[in-house]
Image (cartoon, rainbow, N blue to C red):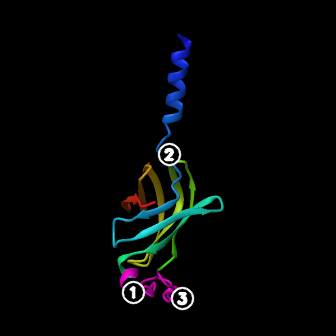
Amino acid sequence: MKLPILAAALALSVSAPAFAQDVTGLWQTQTNGGQVEISRCGNSLCGKLVNSDHIKSDPTVKDQKNKDASLRNRPLKNMQMLYDFTGGPTKWTGGKVYNAADGGTYSGTIILLSANELKLKGCIVAPLCKTEKWTRIK
């Protein structure tokens, strides 16, 4: 009698966190055809913009709307746009999200919803937030 219970408990313990995969990888954003590569940067998560509709039409496009004029000449391609996210394994907080569309940097939270979907929330100050769902490419 104890053996089937033990086997069931082991099966549940192995399968329960099945979606709690590593959040690192290539993600498709909801807007502008963006593709962001999320990786580990020391003890935190970071992400760089590897592709977008703007980059596809002009691979040399610059960060023209940045609020810091000294950064407006940097290329959008491979620009770090997520940084300093800590936590895990399914929720990372305390990070920053740079939005090239308006040149603003916002407080961010990443929540891994499944192996292939995450939610990114960026806030000026709560409740002034925007949330996007991203889909894993690889």
Q: Residue at x 54, y 88 (%)?
A: 70
Q: Residue at x 64, y 58 (%)?
A: 43
Asked which secondary structure carries label 2, the reply is loop
Gap in angstroms between the C-alphas marked 1 and 3: 21 Å
Q: Nearer the viewer, residue 94 or 63?
A: 63
Specify whether residue 103 is in view.
yes
Local SS, label 1: loop
From the top left corner, tell me how far across and down residue 20 is, in percent. Answer: 50, 45
Query: What's under tag 3, amino acid-wise?
Result: Ser
Asked if the residues shown at circle 2 and circle 3 are in contact, with their CB atoms under 8 angstroms apart, the answer is no
Residue 101 is situated, as x and y percent measured from the top left of the image, at 38, 77
* Crowd class of label 2 (few under 14; some 14 to 19; many from 20; radius 10 Å): some
Magenta stretch holds residue 112: no
Give the class, few, some or many, for how many residues have Cα within 10 Å of label 3's Cα (few <14, many ≥20). few
Residue occupied by mark 1: 58
Name the amino acid, label 1.
Asp
Disc assigned to residue 118 = none
Q: Position of residue 124 (x, y in %)?
A: 43, 66
Which residue shows up at 46% across the image and 82% down it? Answer: 66
Disc number lying in front (2 or 3): 2
Quarter of the figure with residue 10: top right
Mark 2 vs mark 3: which is more N-terminal?
A: 2
Three-letter code for the amino acid on which mark 2 is drawn: Ala
Q: Which portion, as a residue range, is magenta?
A: 55-76
